[in-house]
Image (cartoon, helix red, strand yellow):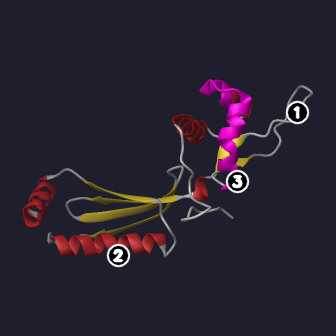
Amino acid sequence: MAVMPSSGSGSLPETSESTRQAITLLLRHGPMARSELARRLSLSKGALTKMTKPLLEIGLLTEGSTAERGSVGRPVLPLSVNAGWSRFVGVKLTDERSHGVLTHLSGSVIRGIEAPLPGRERADVLALIIAQVNDLVGGAPAAGMGVSLARGAAMVAMVDHLARRTQ
């Protein structure tokens, strides 16, 4: 079962630029041996161990099973990001519809929904977005949310309308 972030001990600790780079490399390239990750980050193996230990403890990083090697020595336990550790919600508004998705940390879609826009009034559109987000997360936490607007004449008119209403 994936460990989800929360306030308290399961939260992401303060991260350095090197830590963010390590997480990004693992997300982009998949599981990687510590030695390879240290090489790509120009870190010593000791510095990498110190950096990754808290991330392993909270479940953001995991150690894979022993990789087969053609040589003797210490077995390789590749590090990987636990994609289920955190979730994100995205909503895209088009001229006529709202499309919502719930994703893992890796960006893989867990679930998607869509619905017609109920109109152009701010309250109606916001109510739809809130309903979609609540439906997607199902009461579980999400680390972040983004809303995007598709380009189109009707969408531009709606954005202009909403902007005038909020001024």
Residue beneath the point at 54% across and 65% down: 7
- Per the image, the residue denoted by label 1 is 74
Residue beneath the point at 85% across and 31% down: 69
Calculate the distance from the C-alpha at mark 3 to the C-alpha at mark 1.
22 Å
User: Residue 124 location in percent, x, y?
Assistant: 21, 75
User: Residue 143 location in percent, x, y?
Assistant: 47, 60
Calculate the distance from the C-alpha at mark 3 to the C-alpha at mark 2.
35 Å
Q: Secondary structure at mark 2?
A: helix
Q: Are marks 2 and 1 in contact (CB under 8 Å)?
A: no
The residue stretch that appears in magenta: 37-58
User: Residue 9 location in percent, x, y?
Assistant: 62, 62
Q: Mark yes or no: residue 31 visible.
A: no
Residue toward you, 25 or 108: 25
Q: Quadrant of the N terminus?
A: bottom right
Name which residue type carries label 1.
Arg
Magenta-colored stretch includes residue 54: yes
Image quadrant in which you'd find residue 89 = bottom left
Name which residue type carries label 2.
Ala
Q: Are marks 3 and 2 in contact (CB under 8 Å)?
A: no
User: Residue 151, relative to residue 16: is it above or below?
Assistant: below
- Of badges 2 and 1, the one in the foreground is 1
User: Residue 80, relative to residue 138: is it above or below?
Assistant: above
Q: Using a 10 Å C-alpha cutoff, classify the residue at mark 1 as few (fewer than 14 neighbours), some (14 to 19) or many (20 or more).
A: few
- Of badges 3 and 2, the one in the foreground is 3
- Per the image, the residue denoted by label 3 is 57
Residue toward you, 118 or 14: 14
Name which residue type carries label 3.
Glu
- Per the image, the residue denoted by label 2 is 131
64 lies left or right of 61: right
Q: Earlier in the sequence, mark 3 or mark 1?
A: 3
Calculate the distance from the C-alpha at mark 2 to the C-alpha at mark 1.
52 Å
Q: Secondary structure at mark 3?
A: helix
